[in-house]
Image (spheres, rainbow, N blue to C red):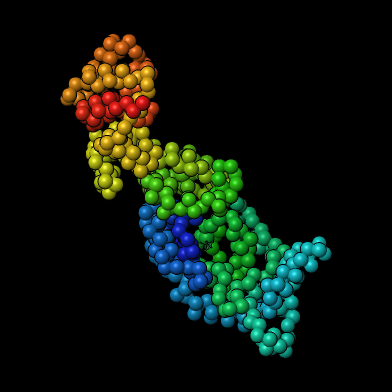
Amino acid sequence: MTVICRFAPSPTGRLHVGNVRTALMNWLFAREKSGKFILRIDDTDTSRSTDAYELGIKDDLNWLGLSWDYTFNQSDRFQTYRSIAEKLKKNGLLYACYETSEELDRQRKLQRVQGKPPVYNRSGLELTSHQKTAYEDEGRRPHWRFKLSGAIVTWNDMVRGNQSVDTSSLSDPVLIRGDGTFLYTLPSVVDDIDENITHVIRGEDHVTNSGAQIEIFKALSRHIPTFAHTPLLVGKDGKGLSKRLGSLSMEELNSQGFEPLAICSLLGKIGTSDTIEPRISMNILTSEFSFSKIGRAPARFDETELELLNGKLLNELSYKEVSAKLSEMSILGSKDFWELIRSNILKMNDAILWNEIIFKDMQGQINEEDKDFCFGAAEMLPSSITDNTWSEWTNALKIKYNRKGRDLFMPLRKALTGLDKGPEMAKLIVLLGSDKARERLRNFSG
Ligand code: GLU
C-alpha cells in the first residue's frame, strides 16, 4: 500500500510555525515511507481565501523544501461536494435546520441553566414538510446537519493510541451553511476518500472533529484513513502561540535570515524523544522520523532555540553554499569574510552588520581612559597587515603600555568594531586594513 498524506491549509494567511509543523510531519512521514505528499488548498470559504495567500503558501513550502507531488483546490470541486451532499440527504443523514444563530444561542443558554450539555436538540429532524415550507416562506434558508449515530467512535491514533469519541455528546455538525456554502468537514472527507488518503496527520485540535468525520467516512465509503493527531505547539511559557503567529510566519522568518533547515530541524524535533540539534539535510530528518518518538505533551517552541540552531547550522555552511545569498544581500566580503563571521552570527541577516563594520565607514567606541592608548596603537600599527600583525602589534602594545588581558584587548576591539564581542580580531583586522583601523583608533569623540 502506498502511503498518501495531505497537507490542507486554508489560504487565509501565510504559513506559520504551527501549520508548518503539521506540513512537515506529513511530508516526513510520506517521504520516509516512499509515499506521496499532496497539497490540498482548503479554499471553500471563498470570502476569506485569496490567490495571493495561496501563492504565498506555495512559496513558503518551496522555500522550506517541502515539495508536493500533486496539488488541487477544493473550490474546483463544489459540484462533487454537492452531489455527495444530495446522497447524504437521500439517506436521511443530512437534514435541514432552520434555527437562526440567535435561536441556537438561546437554546444553549437554556441548556446550561438546566445543567445540560449544550448539544443541538435535533429539532430539525422533527420538522414536517409543512413547517419547512412555512420557514421558507418567512425567507429562512436551511443549514444542513449531519446526523451522528450517537455511538462511540474509536480509532487507533498513531500518536495518541486508542481514542474514543462519544458522538452522543456532540452536536450534529453543520456541513452546509444557510447560504449554501460548505464548511470544512464534508469536503475534507470527500477529498480524503477520492484521493485515497491513507493517513490524516494533523493537530490534536481536530480530535473531536475526527470522531464526527469518521462517521461521515463510514456513511460514504469503506475506506477510513489512519489518524495521527500531534500535540499542539505552545510558546516556551506553555501558553498558546496564536497571538504571536504573525511574527512567526515563514515570510517573516525568511526575511530575518533564518535557514529553512533550522526551522525544519526544530519543528521536526520539538516534542519528540530525539535531540534538538540542526540536521544538515532533509534526508536525515526523513530517515529519523517516527510517530513513536512524538510525545503527548504540547511541543514548546522557543525562538531563542531557533536562533541557536540557526547559528549552529550557519557555522556548518561553506562559502560556496552561501555565496549567492551573500551577494543577493549586497555583502562585499567573500570567502575570508564568511569564514571569519560564520561562527559569530545567529541569522544570515547578522552578516549585514559585520559587512558594515568591516567594509563601510563607521565609528568605533573609545572610552576617555583608553584614548591615549588607542592613539598610540594607531601609530604603532604597520601599514600592511598580515596574519601575524595582530599578535606582533598587541605584544608590542603590551610592553609599551603595560597592559594585558582585557585591558589590552577590549579597547582595541571596541575601537575597531564598536562592539565588545565578535570574530577573531587577528583575522578581522586583516580584512579591515590598516587605514581604516588607524582611522578608528584615532576617532575619539569624547
Ligand atoms: N484546512 C484545515 C485546517 O487547516 C485542514 C485540517 C485537516 O488537515 O483536515 O485546519
- Looking at the image, the residue that sits furthest to the left is 384
Residue 315 lies in quadrant: top left
Which quadrant is home to the C terminus? top left
Residue name at image x 64 percent, y 56 percent: 163
Q: Quadrant of residue 123?
A: bottom right
Q: Relative to 182, does residue 210 appear above or below in the rendering?
A: above
Q: Of residues 285 and 53, which is closer to you in this image?
A: 53
| Residue sitting farthest toward the front | 446
Q: Position of residue 380 (x, y in %)?
A: 22, 18
Indicate the position of residue 69 as horizontal and vertical percent values: 38, 62
- Residue 42 position, x and y percent, is 49, 67
Could you tell whether 253 is left or right of 375 in the image?
Answer: right
**Residue occupying the point 52% across, 76% down:** 81
From the viewer's side, name the closer residue of 435 and 409: 435
Residue 310 left/right relative to 217: left
Number of marks in picture: 0
Residue at image location 34% in from the left, 13% down from the top: 403
- Toward the viewer: 327 or 415? 415
Q: Which residue lies at the image location 47% right of the left edge and 39% below the top edge?
A: 305
Would you say 250 lies left or right of 295 here? Answer: left
Q: Is residue 311 left or right of residue 194?
A: left
Residue closest to the eye, 412 or 211: 412
347 versus 228 height, above or below:
above
Q: Picture coordinates of residue 261 (x, y %)?
A: 39, 46
